[in-house]
Amino acid sequence: MDMREIMVDKVVINIGVGESGEKLQKAHKVLEEITGAKAVRTKAKVRQPKWGIRPGLEIGVKTTLRKDKAISFLKRALSAKGFKIRKSQFDENGNFAFGIKEHIELPGTKYNPQLGVFGFDVIVALKRRGYRVKFRRYCKNKVGKKHRITKEEAIEYVTKKLGIRVSE
């Protein structure tokens, strides 16, 4: 057990619809279908009068996957992207995100005319052992500077472990 070993903490899948109602219901069903996990609705935080959005209005759905389920979904999503992502899609903490324009691009997903087609975002959070000190209730503390994951370490991890090609 190596404390410096990088691993996938969680994979968050998000579908932003921009409106509540029937379209949101369909997006909810699609997300649960492609992930096999329970989805929750997300609410707007700011007011956008042009689009008719107000705080508290349900405008999207998301779900979080962890452990084996997260890695298996991530590999399916990456195969839809051709196992290629850009360097700009990584943040300074080693996390990365990418979008898929149509959910039917995922391998093993069939088009359902009653539901339609939705695009979604996949956000991947990486971690090392010992990151729990940041989130625990009792004796909360910061993760040390040398223990944090850098952008370069994250790129190296995804190329070796997940087989992703990272381009400029």
Image: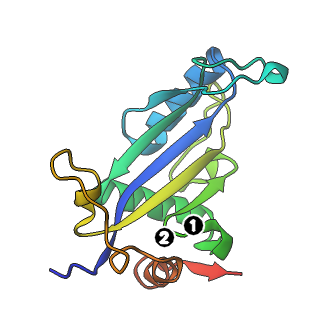
Which three-letter amino acid code belongs to the residue tagged 1? Answer: Asp
Q: Residue at horizontal 49%, vertical 65%?
A: 95
Secondary structure state at the residue bearing disc 1? loop
Q: Quadrant of residue 96?
A: bottom right
Please name the residue that numbered disc 2 is placed on: 94
Task: Please say if the residues under marks 2 and 1 sit with CB atoms less than 8 Å apart.
Answer: yes
| CA distance for labels 2 and 1 | 6 Å
Q: Residue 92, image x and y in percent? A: 54, 70
Q: Residue at horizontal 66%, vertical 38%?
A: 118
- As drawn, 110 above or below 18: below
Q: Residue 49, image x and y in percent? A: 80, 19
- As drawn, 22 above or below 92: above
Q: Residue 128, image x and y in percent? A: 30, 71
Which of the labelled discs sits on residue 91, or is there none? 1
Quarter in which the C terminus is drawn: bottom right
Disc 2 crowd rating (10 Å Cα; few below 14, some 14-19, many 20+) is many
Which three-letter amino acid code belongs to the residue tagged 2? Answer: Gly
Which of the labelled discs sits on residue 142, or is there none? none
